[in-house]
Amino acid sequence: MHRVIVVLAFTLGLASGQTSNRTAGERQAILDYKLTMARANQLLAAMQDMTRYLVSRPDWQSRMAKSAKMTPAERAASMEQDPKVMAILKQNDLTARDYLAGILALRYSVWLAAGRTGNPDIIASPANLAFAKANLAQLLPKMDAADGVSSPRK
């Protein structure tokens, strides 16, 4: 249960920290991120390992709250200073900036493909949305697994 809360808090923290005051550059980074199944698998594997690592930290709640208040550049710099985070990213052939933009591009594309359109700040490029729609049956269970959800979404 903690795992689901952490992943959702982290993703929503990324999103809330970037929605109403998202710069044009941040928005463009999400829109420019090109999703493929290989890249989605890298992001999801990294997210799963990142969640395990964050939950293992005794200060994970305060770290999440602090991260939610950071700019994307500050968040990337913070990630780059943590050797364990960088090992996870390196293992999955990602940089901190790739991870930050990519995880939002993937999650937002999947949310929109699944019909979750209630928030106008949730954005996806037409290509990423088409990718998510074409692969939704594969992506949803993988995202649930990375989120720590044991049962499929309805």
Image (cartoon, rainbow, N blue to C red):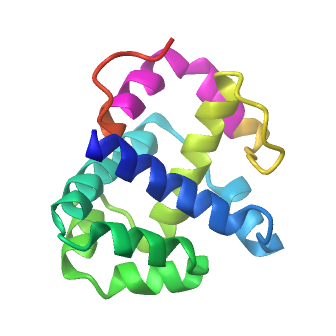
**20 vs 142, nearest the viewer:** 20
Magenta segment's dominant SS is helix
Tell me: residue 10, above or below residue 44: below
Q: Residue furthest top?
A: 154
Q: Is residue 57 left or right of residue 139?
A: left
Q: Quadrant of residue 86?
A: bottom left
Q: Position of residue 134 (x, y in %)?
A: 60, 19
Residue 38 horizontal/vertical position (percent): 40, 40
Q: Quadrant of residue 10?
A: bottom left
Q: How many marks?
A: 0
Magenta segment includes 133: yes
**Residue 102: image location, x then y, percent:** 53, 55
Q: Is residue 97 magenta?
A: no
Q: Position of residue 129 (x, y in %)?
A: 70, 33
Q: Residue at x 77, y 31 (%)?
A: 117
Residue 150, quarter of picture? top left
Q: Kindly identify the residue that appears in the image at 26 percent across and 67 percent down.
A: 90
Closer to the camera in the image, 85 or 60: 60
The residue located at (20%, 61%) in the rendering is 53
Compared across the picture, whether 53 is left or right of 142 comes to left
- Residue range corresponding to the magenta coloring: 128-144
User: In terms of depth relative to the viewer, which is nearer, 78 or 102?
Assistant: 78
In the figure, 23 relative to 102: above or below? below
Residue at image location 56% in from the left, 42% down from the top:
107
Please say if 70 is above or below 107: below
**Which quarter of the rendering shows the N terminus?**
top left
